[in-house]
Image (spheres, helix red, strand yellow):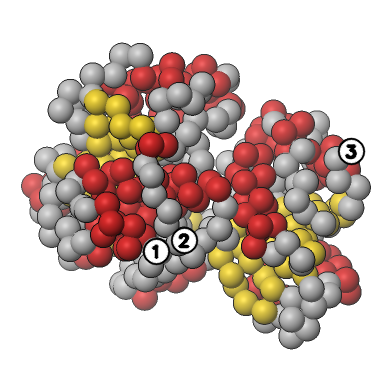
């Protein structure tokens, strides 16, 4: 951890503090004794945990939220640059950095293990953390979810190992300088920024070139989307698909078996015995919002929640659920994330729900985008219906909850799915 940078930060403000990455940095500042404030659009479990630890958080963005004499203002890449808090912070002379920039600064001087990929990076990062913590290597970890054992998305270690989830959104990961880089996969996501899959690959290729010759790149070099980004790599390539392991994972799905192989390969590079790594990984129970069992309704139906919001993720996740609950009825409550993603990948989304017995489509979660009249949950539902006729559209969460209460049976598995706030539907059913 870059102590030289941290020692000069006495007051830090975070714009978009409820974001899973930004909140991890806020937690670092709290642990280092800084006065931490922040703002976000709405309350969440992440915000509640930060408040419990001493952060002062405002709901809504306002210039008055920024403390006087603030040393550092950190913002999520999803925050617009005309945000009033960023404007006043820039005028005050405070250091104003993006989350990825600060992450890169904090990692300076550490042996950085960056976990990248369109899908699976959160689970893989958490798996690596499970192994390294269990092996007493004391890593510092930043992960894009809440770890079940700690209840946070950050672990402060005592060694020079820094394990970090490296996001490709707006080329954020370029701020890191990894000694070991994992690429779980590459897919056509964030096309609102990159335009094409080739644009995505170009960013990954640049990231690959940052790994030094004495470093390592853990990936599937035969993957047709991954192979082109390795052309100019100077680090050695470690093919995780050659890991001959069978881990009795607590979480299901072929995608998680691949994630486990990546984690084992990285653990071996760091000196952990393969058998010991496998034993430790068998203790891994998953993370928040990744095939997470939320509870059981009074009639016996189960409620799960999952963060999947890309066609590939949805398909892989539902295959995992179908393998686990092959005699149950799978009811998916899906909240599309972003108008642009839903519109661009409409045909892929339409074919992603084959393992679901029923799909309920919620309104699109706009996040950082303005509404697009050409795409809607109704348009998506109609596209899904061509492949899975049992589709229902809910105009709001309350309507969806009432529909579920009227239709669910004891043999149902209800899965709320999406990167927005759809988990609230499941929590309401359990409440």
Labelled pair 2, 3 in contact (Cβ < 8 Å): no
Alpha carbons under labels 3 and 1: distance apart: 40 Å
Check disc 3: other Cα within 10 Å, few if <14, some if 14-19, many if 20+. few
User: Tag 3, which secondary structure?
Assistant: loop
Residue 53 visible here: yes
80 on left or right of 280: right
Check disc 2: other Cα within 10 Å, few if <14, some if 14-19, many if 20+. some
Residue 86 visible here: no
Between disc 3 and disc 1, the foreground one is 1
Q: Label 1: which residue? A: 282
Q: Residue at 17%, 48% (x, y): give it.
A: 271
User: Tag 2, which secondary structure?
Assistant: loop
Q: Residue at 31%, 32% (x, y): give it.
A: 238
Q: Label 3: which residue? A: 386
x and y percentages locating residue 7 in the rendered image? 10, 53
Quadrant of the rendered image containing residue 48: bottom left
Tell me which numbered mark, 3 or 1, is placed earlier along the sequence: 1
Numbered label tally:
3
Between disc 2 and disc 3, the foreground one is 2
Q: Residue at 16%, 42% (x, y): give it.
A: 111
Q: Which mark is residue 249?
A: 2
The answer to which of 84 and 42 lies nearer the viewer is 42
307 on left or right of 114: right
Image quadrant for the C terminus? bottom right
The answer to which of 131 and 83 lies nearer the viewer is 131
x and y percentages locating residue 60 in the rendered image? 51, 57
Check disc 1: other Cα within 10 Å, few if <14, some if 14-19, many if 20+. some
Q: In the rendered view, tell whether residue 171 sits above or below residue 164.
A: above
Alpha carbons under labels 2 and 1: distance apart: 5 Å
x and y percentages locating residue 287 in the rendered image? 46, 62
The answer to which of 254 and 413 lies nearer the viewer is 254
């Amino acid at each position: 951890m870059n102590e030289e940078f941290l020692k000069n930060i006495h007051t830090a403000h975070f714009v978009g503090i409820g974001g899973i990455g930004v909140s991890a940095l806020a937690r670092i500042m709290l642990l280092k004794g800084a006065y931490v404030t922040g703002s976000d659009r709405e309350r969440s479990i992440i915000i509640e945990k930060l408040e419990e630890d001493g952060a002062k958080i405002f709901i809504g963005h306002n210039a008055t939220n920024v403390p006087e004499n603030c040393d550092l203002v950190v913002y999520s890449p999803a925050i617009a640059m005309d945000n009033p808090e960023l404007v006043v912070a820039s005028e005050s002379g405070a250091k104003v950095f993006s989350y990825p920039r600060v992450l890169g600064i904090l990692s300076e001087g550490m042996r950085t293990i960056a976990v990248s990929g369109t899908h699976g990076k959160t689970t893989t990062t958490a798996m690596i953390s499970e192994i390294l913590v269990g092996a007493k290597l004391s890593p510092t970890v930043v992960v894009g979810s809440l770890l079940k054992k700690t209840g946070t998305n950050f672990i402060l270690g005592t060694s020079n190992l820094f394990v970090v989830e490296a996001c490709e959104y707006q080329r954020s990961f370029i701020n890191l300088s990894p000694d070991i880089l994992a690429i779980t996969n590459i897919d056509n996501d964030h096309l609102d920024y990159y335009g094409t899959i080739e644009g995505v690959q170009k960013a990954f290729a640049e990231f690959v070139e940052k790994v030094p010759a004495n470093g390592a790149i853990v990936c599937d070099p035969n993957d047709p989307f991954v192979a082109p980004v390795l052309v100019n790599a100077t680090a050695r390539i470690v093919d995780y698909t050659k890991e001959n392991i069978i881990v009795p994972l607590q979480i299901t799905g072929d995608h998680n078996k691949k994630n486990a192989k990546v984690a084992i390969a990285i653990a071996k590079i760091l000196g952990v015995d393969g058998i010991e790594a496998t034993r430790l990984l068998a203790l891994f129970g998953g993370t928040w919002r990744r095939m997470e069992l939320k509870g059981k309704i009074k009639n016996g139906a189960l409620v799960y929640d999952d963060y999947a919001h890309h066609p590939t993720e949805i398909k892989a996740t539902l295959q995992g659920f179908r393998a686990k609950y092959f005699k149950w009825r799978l009811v998916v409550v899906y909240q599309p994330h972003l108008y642009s993603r839903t519109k661009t990948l409409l045909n892929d989304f339409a074919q992603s729900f084959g393992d679901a017995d029923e799909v309920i489509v919620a309104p699109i979660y706009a996040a950082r985008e303005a509404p697009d009249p050409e795409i809607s949950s109704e348009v998506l539902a109609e596209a899904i219906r061509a492949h899975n006729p049992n589709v229902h559209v809910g105009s709001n969460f309350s309507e969806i909850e009432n529909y579920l209460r009227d239709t669910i049976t004891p043999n149902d598995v209800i899965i709320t799915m999406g990167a927005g706030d759809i988990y609230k539907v499941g929590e309401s059913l359990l409440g």
